[in-house]
Image (cartoon, rainbow, N blue to C red):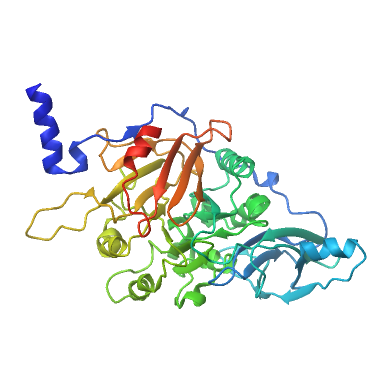
Amino acid sequence: MAIIWFWLMTCVLLHIAVLCNAGVTSGFVRKAAWSVDIPKSHFPPPSGTNAPEQVHITQGDHEGSGMIISWVTPFERYPNVVTYWEADAEYEHNKHKHYHKHKTHSTITTYRYYDYSSGYIHHATIKHLKFDTKYFYEVASHNVTRRFSFTTPPKPGPDVPYTFGVIGDLGQTADSNQTLEHYVSNPIKGQAVLFAGDLSYADDHPNHDNTKWDTFGRFIEKSVAYQPWIWSAGNHEIDFAPNLGESVPFKPYLHRYRVPYKASQSTSPLWYSIKRASTYIIVLSSYSAYGKYTPQYKWLEQELPKINRSETPWIIVILHAPWYNSNRYHYMEGESMRVQFEPWFVQHKVDIVFAGHVHSYERSERISNVKYNITNGLSGPVRDSSAPVYITIGDGGNIEGIADNFIDQQPSYSAYREASFGHAILEIKNRTHAYYTWHRNQDNEPVIADSAWFFNRFWYPEDESSINNKEA
């Protein structure tokens, strides 16, 4: 009895995670196997001469009433037009009423990377769409027309429900395919995807084989042509290879994937913000300068105080290198960014931070490590009701395989961890409650491997751990 009492008192007095094991390390053991890229022949271009391909969409403005439509034509620049119309208008037309189709022209870009030349990459921004409305859109070549659809989000508001899928470090392997199929088939339907970086993994192939960017675009089209993916850049997007004569970082990524960064007064597409329903989403770049007085630092310093929690109560941050990670892979690689920005996250009561990079899954408690200074020795993470939950979701299934080397003693800041591939769903219910689930690839889609209720830090800053531990 005396030994038990001593141990409990030690945990209480020290407060720090490394000594008090409060979380769950999953007993599920994923079968060890290499992740192998799906052959390029499995991702053929659509049939027809110069057929538009690699169609993908993302939010096109700050509020949610715009959409960026992107696609590639392999041989010819034109036509460069996207045609779009309201789905309800087409229904009325079928009842013999007139409706109007709208057209927007794309800007066109191309690039060369070592021995690769891209097709013609189109980006068309559609503005002034109606909120919460389904639209059809078409992109075409001279003899091929491809039709898709999307639904705009509701107008930003404090109690607007919205559901996100969450994916990171995807690649294009058999495991990646299982992740994407599970997400698309999940009965809890995501309306948009928060993507935590590392897309094609082209740089893992000889000479950064940029045809892997083309096959990746075809691979994800089944989802991203119909719902926006909110992009962040990871280390595999850097593509910096002076030995190949390629000294411009992020070249393929920035040519292929456009985001509305100027709408949030950012000076770079690698960090930006958007509103979507009841959320305010901030995307940061782990691989751009973020030290004091750098553009990213100054932007974030000005951005966080702008957020009106009466309009968008949920603050979600997406970045790539996790700040809290108990896996030996990439351990503490996000530490300098954490030291720089964590006090701001606590001050402004950020709700959730999603990261990738580590190829496994982990969810933290609400903790912070902001009390440390060089003289007081308070250098460990502690429970903090104003802090975010940190979620590592770098488990999309890429070619580099699973990160299965967790630190033996699970820190108590780690609520749940598992070396498996999968995806997550985040259901924003209202201004106070959100429900989060994680789904491993080895289960059927509806099976929930990890779940948690999140209480909003601004409107309902209560401790969720008791209900989540009970649920677990």
Q: Is residue 95 above or below residue 76?
A: above
Image quarter (top left, top right, bottom left or bottom right) of the C terminus: top left
The answer to whether residue 282 is left or right of residue 464 is right
Quarter occupied by residue 46? bottom right
The answer to whether residue 195 is left or right of residue 219 is left
Exactly how many numbered labels are in the figure? 0
The answer to whether residue 450 is left or right of residue 375 is right
The x and y percentages for residue 98 are 88, 71
Q: Is residue 407 above or below residue 152?
A: above
Looking at the image, which residue is at 69% across and 64% down?
72
Quarter occupied by residue 363? top left
Looking at the image, which residue is at 33% across and 45% down?
364
Q: Nearer the viewer, residue 339 or 80?
A: 339
The answer to whether residue 210 is left or right of residue 147 is left
Quarter occupied by residue 234? bottom left
Task: Name the residue at the right extreme.
Answer: 96
The x and y percentages for residue 206 are 52, 52
Q: Nearer the viewer, residue 158 or 231?
A: 158
Q: Is residue 446 above or below residue 227?
A: above
Observer able to see residue 237: yes
Q: Nearer the viewer, residue 62 or 398?
A: 62
Looking at the image, which residue is at 36% across and 50% down?
390
The x and y percentages for residue 111 are 60, 70
Looking at the image, which residue is at 50% across and 59% down?
159
The x and y percentages for residue 174 are 59, 38
Q: Nearer the viewer, residue 279 or 218?
A: 279
Image quarter (top left, top right, bottom left or bottom right) of the N terminus: top left
